[in-house]
Amino acid sequence: MLPAPFGAGFYQACITQQREKGWKIRYDELQFQMEKAMRKFCLIILLCLPISTTLAAERVFDIGIEQREVTSPGDVLRVVKGDTVILRWHSDEAVELHMHGYDIPLKVEANRLNEMRFNAEVSGRFPVTSHGFSGAHSDDHKALLYVEIYPE
């Protein structure tokens, strides 16, 4: 029979201690791996966020004016905040336009394509008004159409 330090109880104690340490080591390693994976996940999310917010669309609208009324595409244009908006105007007579809220003036020449471009940075409903047809400036503000900019 082996002495007490080398008996069955001693070996059982060593095996139990080794299992406990091994399990602790495995648990610590697992915790470390999970933290590492979480850091990678957070980094990927952070890298993707700016990309998704910068994927703004370029929205082009061809707008016709005949006999001082908008004929197409309608009286309300809808875009999303962050979009680049291009309004291409074609009119049968000269007109001064103004987009309120963004304070964008445009002198539209008769029978020519005229472009108004802006970045939709502020959400809301903004009228585009005429300030005089055929070159005669007028303080009468007639809303030709509205541009509605929705939050992202």
Image: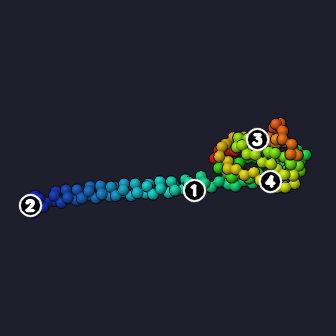
Whether label 2 touches label 4, CB < 8 Å? no
- 4 or 1: mark nearer the eye: 4
- Could you classify mark 3 by the number of other residues whose Cα lies within 10 Å: few (under 14), some (14-19), or many (20 or more)? many
Residue at left 88%, top 49%?
Answer: 93
In three-dimensional space, the C-alpha distance between marks 2 and 1, rounded to whole angstroms, equals 71 Å
Residue at left 91%, top 46%?
Answer: 67
- 3 or 4: mark nearer the eye: 4
Q: Depth check: 66 or 52 in front?
A: 66
Q: Which mark is residue 114?
A: 4
Of callouts 2 and 1, which one flags the residue occurring earlier in the amino acid sequence? 2
Of callouts 2 and 4, which one flags the residue occurring earlier in the amino acid sequence? 2
Look at mark 3 in the image and give the residue it sits on.
127
Q: Quadrant of residue 15?
A: bottom left
Residue at left 83%, top 36%?
Answer: 140
Q: Quadrant of residue 1?
A: bottom left
Q: Quadrant of residue 18?
A: bottom left
Q: Secondary structure at mark 3?
A: strand
Residue 137 placement (x, y as % from top left): 84, 41
Q: Secondary structure at mark 1?
A: helix
Q: How is the image coloured?
A: rainbow
- 2 or 4: mark nearer the eye: 4
